[in-house]
Amino acid sequence: MPLAEKSLIEGIRRSARQPGGSVRLGIGDDCAVLRPPKGHQILVTTDYTLENIHFRRSWHAPEIVGRRCLTRGLSDIAAMGGKPLAAFLSLALPADLPQRWVDQFMRGLLGLARECNVPLAGGDTAQSLEGILADIIVLGSAPNGKALVRSGAKPGDRIYVSGELGGGTAALKEFLAGRKPRPQDYPRHFHPVPRLKLGEFLRVRGIATALIDLSDGLSTDLGHICEESQVGAEILADQIPRARVGRKRDPIDLKLALHGGEDYELLFTAPARKHVPGSVAGVAITPIGRITPDKRTLLRTSKRVEALEPQGWEHFRS
Ligand code: ADP
Ligand code: MG
């Protein structure tokens, strides 16, 4: 059974970082008080992590669930070229959940918070009738009018992606096949890293015309950029950096790299004349195609050109 609400919050408060920086007042009052940097706008994102939708207790250690939970929020801030200011966590926990699970979940979440220098500044705690529900809210900031949105891609822009794709979903495929993937063989699934430094680099250097994080899969998220920017795209199948996973570090199927979700890499467009480095903060940047004027999304293989339909993750799609 988890500790009663009051002592549970006390525990979280003790292990969360003390306020500082933009957080003038953190956990313990009715509201947190933040002081955003001068001349900046506030970015806000919220993401659910739900038992049996986003994780399974029999598959995922609690630390990993906590880390993945905060990654979702921080990756959205990275995808705007922002800097995270503070995180908030709303938890609903079933009465029969061991307190150890909560402690380890918080250890994973706060470990990543510390790595990224983001204080946990508040939240809510309640009992759920069934299953664990965690809603992460992250506030960030970007200089006035400078946040990188999805709608700025122009025909002729090059399309780039960070890291490798498909590793997030490859581990799920293993679980579904009844195998037990080892965390060290599937780092992007078990130990995701939000690309905050890259997002900020792209904003500060004025490189990206549009930016999104890959949470639902390349085909789906590229579709979002194209829709918001009113353009099309052509992707070169041979150029897609496919994740190397498993004991043998084999590159995964192209299909997983194209449609798999939860990689938390960044996808961006930049004018063809802009110099884009081959890596930023230790993360490889790969050109994978270009933006076209005619609103279709195409995949060019060595044999032919085909339509690239969004086949990534979408809730309620049957
Ligand atoms: P209130 O009833 O005023 O909403 P709560 O008793 O719910 O206050 O929360 C007390 C304090 O603890 C608040 O500062 C709140 O932000 C914080 N808090 C509650 N639950 C969590 C949580 N899961 N994670 C982080 N902070 C929390
Ligand atoms: Mg409350």
Image (cartoon, rainbow, N blue to C red):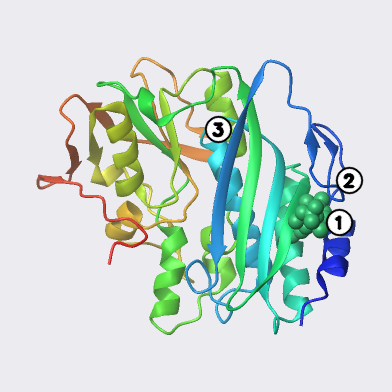
Where is residue 215? Give x, y as percent. Answer: 45, 50
Which callout, 3 or 2, points at the residue further toward the start of the chain?
A: 2
Q: Residues within 10 Å of mark 3 (few under 14, many from 20)?
A: many
Q: Position of residue 270 (x, y in %)?
A: 39, 23
Q: Nearer the viewer, mark 3 or mark 1?
A: 1
Any part of residue 292 in sight: yes
* Ligand 2: quadrant of the figure: bottom right
Which of marks 1 and 3 precedes in the sequence? 1
* Residue visible at 63% across and 66% down in the picture: 64
Between 157 and 41, the one lying in front of the other is 41
Q: Are marks 1 and 2 in contact (CB under 8 Å)?
A: no
Say which of 88 and 194 sits in front.
Answer: 88
Which is more toward the observer, 252 or 2? 2
User: In this image, 81 relative to 37: left or right?
Assistant: left
Secondary structure, mark 3, is: helix
Name the residue tied to disc 1: 13
Mark 2 sits on what residue? 18
- What residue is at 55 percent from the left and 78 percent from the top? 59
Residue 150 placement, left or right of 83: left
Looking at the image, residue 233 lies above or below residue 73: above
The residue sitting at 75% across, 63% down in the picture is 106
Residue tagged 3? 199
Binning the other alpha carbons within 10 Å of mark 1 as few (below 14), some (14 to 19) or many (20 upward) gives some
Q: Secondary structure at mark 1?
A: helix
- Label 1 lies in ligand 1 vicinity (Cβ under 8 Å): yes
Look at label 1 and name its amino acid: Arg
- Relative image position of residue 173 (x, y in whole percent): 39, 72
